[in-house]
Amino acid sequence: MDISTQEIERIVKSVVAGLSKETSANEFSTITSYTATESPPKRNIKGEWGVFEDVELAIEAAYKAQIDWVTHYKIYERQRVIENIRRIARQNIETWCHLIIEETQMGRYEDKLEKHLAVINSTPGPECLITEAMTGDSGLMLEEYAPFGVIAAITPTTNPTETIINNTISMIAGGNAVVFNVHPRAKKVCTLCLQTLNKAILEAGGPENLITMTREPSLENVDKLAASPQIRLMVGTGGMGMVNKLLHSGKKTIGAGAGNPPVIVDETADIELAASQIYKGASFDNNILCFAEKEVFVVSSHLQGFIYNMKKQGAYLIENHQIHTLLEKVFVLKTDGNYDVNKDWVGKDATCILESIGIYAPKECRLIICEVPANHPFVMVEQLMPILPIVRCENFEEAMQKAVLAEQGNRHTASIFSKDVNHMTQFARAIETTIYVKNSATMAGVGIGGEGHTTMTIAGPTGEGITCARSFTRRRRCMLAEGGLRIV
């Protein structure tokens, strides 16, 4: 790039000044919102560190940045930019975690820190884009991973900045640019995060507007993204309604939908291990993660021991007469007779939920447990709350049958606690989930306390699985015929 020394100095000074200023929650709110009595902000054609007033402007800016990114930057330069993103993100996660809780009213601060560190440290960069080569008498064949171009990424309220960080690293590592449409209930913290990451990109020598968004996200923007010829790939992380909408967009789509992960505790399980790991996973960030344990199927011989050890971990067992009271508080009865989640209680602390029905548990309590039948709404509806239903089963076969029904074909996540390899194998084949964990919390399946890389976009419905940079690229083949370049 042909930039003068004076221009470089000006850019660096501007970026350093922006990064060195500590932004408080109050300062942030003055940047990203305005009161009803004030005039809306003027149409900003240039954008503010990747944030635009119109989605068309956000697309156009990302389109120009992507051409620059793929034309003028080598792979090692992508790596340098991504490492700076990691560095700057680490410096800001405490602020972002506080703001997420303030804005979304969901989850636990200490768990959000752990999630952020996981996506910052364990999301792969360009190193997973491995070129494959084959030679023979007929020539040399190369297959490489090339960018799609500009990606439209829809992010959830449950993991707002975690998904932006994770998607940004994976998508720009593949040579793409990204236009985000964030969840409206997390737009302030997402704006701050995206602007900070753009500063990190520019500080490391990358192009401006490599990631963009609109200040006011909306469903209308999603339609415009889907209709734009400059958008080459749609990526959605969230509920199945959103994923299905993207799948009908006519664009190539990667969809990460809902889950309702079941857990089996069979006759051979280590009950203390099962209780400690299930408590850890089901209470983590108040159970708002799609891959968190949502219901447990325990064989009768282990039921009392399992409940005892869950209570020992800190879980609060509600009695039979309290279960319906809790159900009416946190669920909503629909006109068709089925139940749906009362969103006012999603991601709330266990103690807060218990207090709403007149139960005062120790403040250390992170999880509510109850014994219910297999067809109970707590089992069949994905809650995203720290409420874990336990279903008594006569044996492993019954537990497996009921667990498959509860998972409802989402093929997202499941786990088992067992020492029987045959049981592990049978359940894996029956449940067909993208993530399958044995003898640990399910979050180990995405690299949080387990091996393997981390992602917040688990593409079960469209088959990409635990996404990384490779997921957001196209395989391209180059063939040199007539035995060219061979030395034998």
Image: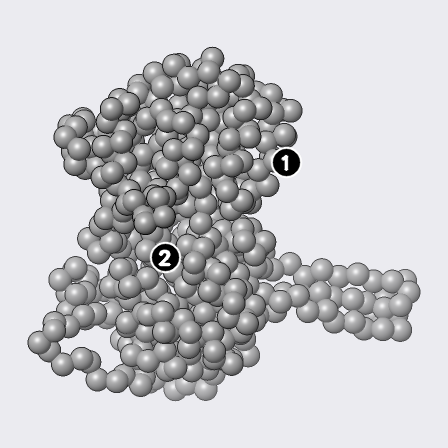
Q: In this view, does 264 lie to the left or right of 129?
A: left
Q: What residue type is labelled 1?
A: Arg
In percent of the image, x 16 and y 59: which residue is there?
25
Q: Where is residue 89 in the image (x, y as percent from the top left)?
A: 34, 57
Residue 282 appearing in the image: no
Q: Quadrant of the C terminus?
A: bottom right
Residue 45 shows up from this direction:
yes
**Where residue 156 is drawn, which disc sits there?**
2
92 relative to 322, above or below:
below
Q: How far apart are marks 1 and 2 (CA)?
A: 30 Å
Q: Quick one: label 1 or label 2, which is nearer the N terminus?
A: 2
SS under mark 2: loop
- Residue carrying label 1: 429
In front: 209, or 485?
A: 209
Q: Residues within 10 Å of mark 2 (few under 14, many from 20)?
A: many
Q: Residue at x 35, y 52 (%)?
A: 159
Q: In this view, does 86 lie to the left or right of 394?
A: left
Residue at 33% x, 70% y is 218
Residue 239 drawn at (x, y percent):
41, 54
Element marked by disc 1? helix
Residue at the far left: name it: 37
Task: Tell me residue 90's x, y (percent).
Answer: 33, 53
